[in-house]
Amino acid sequence: MTADNRYFYEPSKGHGLAHDPLNAIVGPRPIGWISSRNAEGQRNLAPYSFFNCFNYKPPIIGFASTGWKDSVANIVETGEFVWNLTTRGLAEQMNQTSAMLPRGQDEFSFAGLTAKAGTIVKADLVAESPVNFECKLSQCIQLTAANGDKIDTWLVLGEVVAVHIAKHLLNAEGIYQTALAEPVLRAGGPSAYYGISEDLRFDLHRPQV
């Protein structure tokens, strides 16, 4: 504890806490529920804790994978993937798809989910999910430390080429209703998730200077 009553640590020397607070502080985060196919056409579906949107036009989304997992291998092989929105009603099935199944075993079947053919890409959509983004790979980047050392973590970025939205999530003015979708957000620790509510919304407008 420092003199200003703040806990301080240098990550390279360890945090000294019961659990690394990094992903609890940078959170809650949307879940990268990523479906893909390998070159042989075998399906894969897996959730990723580090996921977000990075650009408007063209729309670019991305996720980070610690290790060269099946999702990354499939996407690099085929150049395609789909992001599926995880809702509260799908949380348990999303969690099922995090199981370490043998390569080639179908997580859709394992979790009792329906695979729906993409419109533009060959990767499948989670039919039960109310929002799906079909994506084409734009970059796959191996991360490096500040000293230039390569890290066994891969950032996969994709351009969104097709969007599917359940109509009940669009109001009469055509505005997407974020809270109505009941998205599930990832927090810290091995099991912490959050939801959102319209009651917690507040609005701020950019200052005019």
Image (cartoon, rainbow, N blue to C red):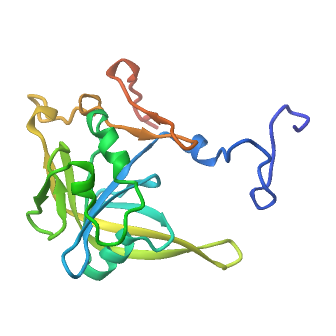
**Residue nearer the viewer, 71 or 62:** 71
**Residue nearer the viewer, 202 or 168:** 168
> Residue 150, how many percent across, how many down?
61, 79
Task: Please give the name of the residue rendered at 22% of the width and 32% of the height, measured from the top-left corner.
Answer: 177
**Residue nearer the viewer, 173 or 73:** 73
Relative to 76, does residue 191 appear above or below in the rendering? Answer: above
**Residue nearer the viewer, 53 or 107:** 107
Relative to 86, does residue 37 appear above or below in the rendering? Answer: below
Which quadrant does the N terminus fall into?
top right
Quadrant in the rendering for residue 119: bottom left
Task: Please give the name of the residue rendered at 19% of the width and 67% of the height, measured from the top-left corner.
Answer: 123
> Residue 67, how many percent across, how many down?
51, 71
> Residue 182, how many percent across, how many down?
29, 31
Quadrant in the rendering for residue 181: top left
Left or right relative to 41: residue 77: right
Task: Please give the name of the residue rendered at 66% of the width and 79% of the height, measured from the top-left corner.
Answer: 148
Relative to 159, does residue 141 appear above or below in the rendering? Answer: below
Quadrant in the rendering for residue 4: top right
Left or right relative to 96: residue 154: right
> Residue 140, how many percent across, how many down?
41, 75
Total residue callouts: 0
Quick one: which residue is furthest to the top in this view?
A: 199
